Image: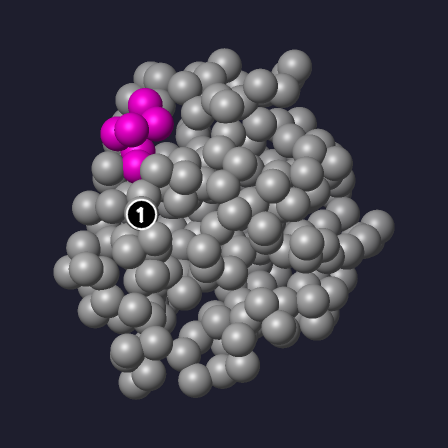
Amino acid sequence: MATSRFEHPSAAPVALLLPDLDCEGLSYWQDHWIATRIDCRAVDLGHVRTPDRNNCVSRLEHAMRGIDAPLILVGHGLGALTIAAWAGLMSSESEVAVAGALLIGPSDPVAERGDARLQDFAPLPATIFSFPALVVASDDDALVSPDRAFSLARQWGAGFARFGEWGHFGPRDGLGWWPEGEELLDRFIELVEPGHAPAIAGIDKFALGAVSARSGVSSSLFRP
């Protein structure tokens, strides 16, 4: 049986970062976080032409093994879909090791302008996550509209944070090392790590204050 996060109050959380497609070799914020933070580790989803859902889920499951600390899952695009697929396929015993998840720009595999390589992830699971989660959306993301991201947050029982025009949160969108995202991660970890108030009770207050300012930024939160 997986170990509950609440059995390790003294263990610092470990963030597992799951990348999006086509970010390898670019100035990617996930690479920077992994290089500069001792609490961030990469999850290799494989370099395949067409991502396979079951393979991605298996790679995430493998990355989680042997980590004796609460886990924070941080998925971008494909990585966010992998977390959702994992939550839909795994038993609750496997999920108890997860303290929380950030799903950043979860690509919509059935969108009209979506990436055809993600079709294996359709349909997206309708499972309510057993751990606290936050879906992060951008107003001008070509791969998932804010309304669709909002709907996914509701579908998964997650909170919802809406940024302004940040594109798909990728290297080509001008985020660089994305310090605002790193601040978001830090505040999310503070909220969900053991010893703090239950995340579900505090997530409403968290999301509205977690979105850093940028011209035209708006923020909102939904918790069903």
Place residue 65 in its image quadrant.
bottom left
Amino acid type shown at disc 1: Ser
Dominant secondary structure (helix, strand or loop) of the stretch shown in magenta: helix
Q: Nearer the viewer, residue 104 or 197?
A: 197
92 to the left or right of 172? left
Q: Which residue is mark 1?
A: 91
* Residue stretch in magenta: 52-57
Place residue 27 in its image quadrant.
top left
- The residue lying furthest to the left in this view is 66
Place residue 33 in its image quadrant.
bottom left
Q: Could you tell me residue 113's position as x and y percent?
A: 64, 17
Q: Residue at x 63, y 56 (%)?
A: 159
Q: Is residue 50 magenta?
A: no
7 to the left or right of 127? left
Q: Could you tell me residue 36's position as x and y percent?
A: 36, 65
- The residue lying furthest to the right in this view is 216
